[in-house]
Amino acid sequence: MVDQFYIPASSAFNKYHRIHELFIYGFDDEIEEFLISDNFQNGKYTRGKCSFSDLNNSYIDFKKATDLGQELVYLLSFNSSSIFNQNINVLKELLSDYLYSINSSQKNNLLNQPLKKEWVYGLRCYDHLISYLNNVKSMGDRLDIRPFYVLKNHKSRMIERLLYLSEIQILKDPDIYVSNYANIEKISTIILNLSLKYSITKDKNILNRIAEHLEQLSGKEADILPRLIRSIS
């Protein structure tokens, strides 16, 4: 966790304090520089650079303010020796949960606090986003573009998952599903671009177009997912 007030790559730099997680994925000892990524530009996840001193100032200042110390730092490394065995039944169950808007995490929630009842899951997220767009349109609120970045990234990851399932030979007719999700990803990209356009123009007609595309996405996934589940074996 750092304060982006001290990070030059952030739109908060020297303007306001913004405490957020930061991912460091590289460094250069010679020029004392870190390679970093975060939601730097008004919520958009981007890559950037900062000096050792910038990061030190950012972290030290926040550590003094919170008194959380080393709990704020996590070291990650790739474990090339791990072997992952795909559980087909669990995979199909999770896809089914997504299709029927079931909260998959409740299966692992025996000892934790119950999740909020108003949270939605799976395909119901489309209806929730459409409702959110209607509220933005009627109330004149600022549009939060982060859900549309998540939507776009989810479709990109789905394509990668399908390619992986094809690679390990547990998905029949993979080209059909990859092609379908490539089209779905394309629509999600249009939605993201429209949300960015609305943030600039405030043209409410754009919100109607986003809602139409969301309904289109929901229908396409509802159509393809049952067949996809049956094709995994």
Image (cartoon, rainbow, N blue to C red):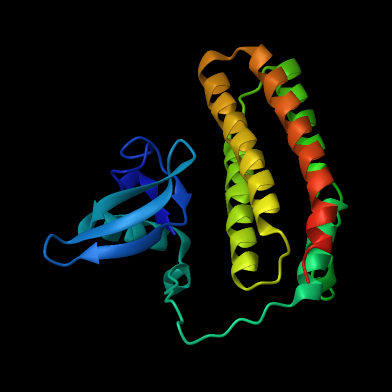
Which residue lies at the image location 70% right of the left edge and 52% below the top edge? 177
Q: In this view, does 134 lie to the left or right of 102?
A: left
Of the pair 126 and 111, the residue shown nearer to us = 126
Q: Find residue 8 and report its image quarter.
A: top left
Which residue lies at the image location 57% right of the left edge and 85% below the top edge? 83
Relative height, residue 172 to residue 217 (above, below): below
Q: In this view, does 169 lie to the left or right of 70?
A: right
Of the pair 143 and 167, the residue shown nearer to us = 167
Relative height, residue 94 to residue 176 (above, below): below
Relative height, residue 84 to residue 183 (above, below): below
Which residue lies at the image location 76% right of the left edge and 32% below the top edge? 216
Residue 115 shows in the view: no
Please provide percent x and percent y for residue 42.
46, 35
Please provide percent x and percent y for residue 143.
62, 27
Q: Is residue 44 left or right of residue 169?
A: left
Relative height, residue 199 to residue 47 (above, below): above
Which residue lies at the image location 47% right of the left edge and 57% below the top edge? 21
Please provide percent x and percent y for residue 119.
80, 49
Of the pair 185 and 41, the residue shown nearer to us = 185
Q: Find residue 231 and report its image quarter.
A: bottom right
